[in-house]
Image: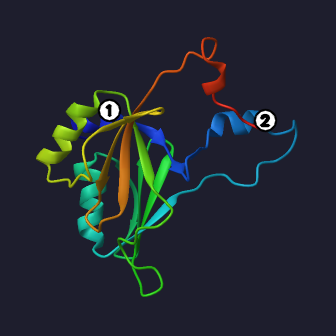
Amino acid sequence: MTALTGFFKMALFNSNAILNTRELAQSRPQGEEKMFSNGNATIFVSDMDRSVNFYTKVLGLQLIQRFGNHWASAAAGKLAIGLHTASNENPAGRNGSTVIGLELTGDIDDSVATLKQKGVRFRGAVSQDNAGKIAYFEDPDGNLLYMIHPKQWNREASPEHAYQSR
């Protein structure tokens, strides 16, 4: 485990929607069975060894399983990132609609510096928006990830910015 491991907690952001699994589980009607037990975000990679090294040694995620050069799974908290060998139908490094976000528990500038020392390529500087401080970076195939140090909202002081669920 690297020192960076402690910086990351699970967060998966897709199309600017936040999936809060705890709130969703609590909103399920009493007695209704859950349909899914787990899941992952799959990334197609060109070199399994290089990708497993990046996600485990560079980012400090935990390797959960590996099946040769066909499949591997690494965990960031409760988020599982599946690594699958690329094909013509699913090439590696395609800029698409899925982006994996890792929520920081520590300082974003320190985290960026640590990853840069490990050779991680960033897309631009750390930026600030309504959600917090964000830094975008790439895995070895150019798949986009980001780290975020979220803004702490005071729900009573600013209810218009509070998290809303159905």
Would you name the residue on which mark 1 appears?
Answer: 6
Residue 39: image location, x then y, percent: 58, 56
**Amino acid identity at mark 2:** Ser
Q: Residue at x 34, y 76 (%)?
A: 69
Q: Residue at x 41, y 68 (%)?
A: 95
Which of 131/83 is in front?
131
Would you name the residue on which mark 2 appears?
Answer: 27
Q: Is residue 72 above or below residue 25?
A: below
Give the Cα separation between the discs numbered 1 and 2. Answer: 30 Å
- Residue extending farthest to the top is 157
- Residue extending farthest to the bottom is 88
- Rendered image coloring scheme: rainbow
Q: Residue at x 77, y 38 (%)?
A: 166
Task: Name the quadrant containing residue 6.
Answer: top left
Label 1 residue SS: helix
In the displayed structure, does residue 137 sit left or right of residue 100?
Answer: left
Label 2 residue SS: helix
**Amino acid identity at mark 1:** Gly
